[in-house]
Amino acid sequence: MKHDHLAGWIRFLASTAAPPTAMRPLELEGYLTGLIVAPDLVPPSMGIEALWGEDEPVFDTADQFQAVLDSVMGYHNELIDTIDRQGAGWRPMFMDKSGTSDLDEAAIWVRGFWQAMSAVPASWSALAEDERTRILVQPFATFVDLGALHDEPLPDNIDEIRQESASLIPRVLPALRKPRPTAFRQPLPPRHPQDRPQPNLPLRVRQEVQTLLPPQLTPQPPPNDYGRAGRRG
């Protein structure tokens, strides 16, 4: 079942071991999806570090840590299989069955995806700067507050822009996805659609995305490895 492993993460969030900054389910799904479609492999230690946020978890035993990690790995692998099997028909958590997106939930989901992008900034920036692949990154960039970055108000139709962008996210994922190792496993060969999506995003977003990504996706220092079991904050 899709949410069996996710339930393990939810139980962790409800426990005393979880830091308050740990990813919530929407953010986790976006983050793991970003790892799955990343242009380059994200080192496992870096992939795990981001799960906790700014604070560290508190595990009494190594077994507790491993159980949480197994839940994340299992959910990650389920997402790979689902995205590869359903392609553009996949519905992320922020979408209902009809494909309508909740914009607040989509923003949280994209926040997780953006964290995965930040793990390999140069590769994502290269996609954004290449006119042949730039359009694949644009749906995610529209959820960043471009107005705040450039000291100007957001357009009046920002909700319309973001609703369109949210609907495009599952359509661009198969084009981004290719067979490669990921942070948590060697994936199955993906199923690519015959035709790549041709999103039609507003001109302002197209103009902004190239300058937006490089300064925002700054490399992070390599985190410590798994040495959290048995540590107390």
Image: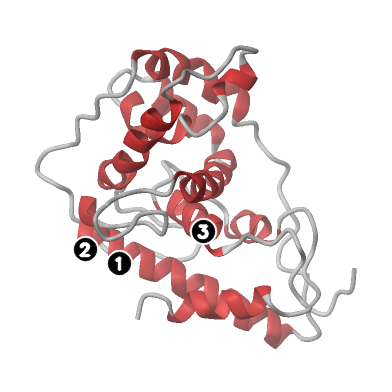
**In front of the other: 209 or 127:** 209
Residues under numbered marks 1 and 2 in contact, where contact means CB atoms less than 8 Å apart: yes
Residue at the spot of label 2: 85
Residue at x-position 35% and y-position 81%: 1
Q: CA distance from mark 1 to mark 2?
A: 6 Å
User: Viewer-proximal residue, 100 or 119?
Assistant: 100
Does residue 13 appear to the left or right of 159 in the view shown? right
Instruction: Give the side of residue 79 with respect to residue 53, left or right.
Output: left
Vertical side of 139 occupied by 193: above or below: below
**Residue 198: % across, % down:** 19, 30
Q: Can you tell which quarter of the image residue 200 is in?
A: top left
Residue under numbered circle 1:
81
| Residue 227 point in image, percent of width and height | 77, 69
- Foreground label between 2 and 3: 3
Query: For the residue labelled by badge 2, is the local secondary structure a helix, a strand or a loop?
Result: helix
Image height of 164 relative to 151, above or below: below
Quarter of the picture holding the C terminus:
bottom right
